[in-house]
Amino acid sequence: MTARAEVVGVEPSRESVPWVIAVLRFRNDGPAPVRVGRYRVVWETGAITASPGDLVLRAGEERVWRLRIDPGHGRLDALTDAPAAARVEVLEVGTAK
């Protein structure tokens, strides 16, 4: 089972409370469907771990996923200034039907 992911962009909030949406791209390069159980987005000054629950990828499928990140997870300006420097670690992948 294999899945990989990357940060493809960061969208700032349009509200007075600071938060961002990390735009992630997941891909299943394996021959069977997989369920992503947990992943972590890491950038220079922060990190967040998420359990999406319903992120299932068919064989060869690529999907864009959005994750809201609040300031309690690190400096958001560092993430918005350099989204290409952030990485996604896929921590848990299981079989899916």
Image (cartoon, helix red, strand yellow):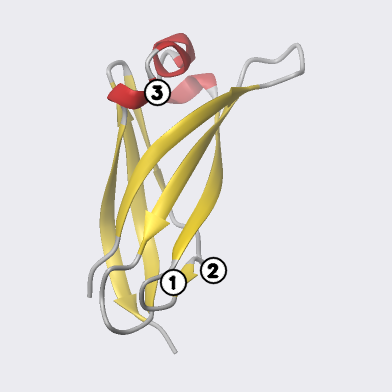
Residue that carries the numbered disc 3 in the rendered image: 83
Residue occupying the point 75% across, 11% down? 16
The 10 Å Cα crowd at callout 1, few under 14, some 14 to 19, many 20 or more, is many
Pointer 2 residue: 54
Q: Position of residue 64 (x, y in %)?
A: 52, 51
Left or right: 24, with 92 as reference point: right
Q: Depth check: give the residue in front, 86 or 53.
A: 86
- Answer with mark 1 or mark 3, whichever residue precedes in sequence: 1
The amino acid pointed to by label 2 is Asp
Nearer to us: label 1 or label 2: 1
Which residue is the extreme one toward the right?
Answer: 15
Could you give the CA–CA distance between mark 1 and mark 3, rounded to whole angstroms? 24 Å
Residue at image coords 39%, 37% = 7
Disc 1 to disc 2, C-alpha distance: 10 Å
- Residue 41 place in picture, x, y as percent: 35, 37
Relative to 19, is 66 above or below?
below
Question: Which mark is drawn over residue 57?
Answer: 1
Where's residue 85, x and y in %?
A: 28, 23
Disc 3 residue type?
Answer: Pro
At numbered mark 2, what does the secondary structure look like: helix, strand or loop? Answer: loop
Q: Is residue 88 left or right of residue 25?
A: left
**Amino acid type, mark 1:** Leu
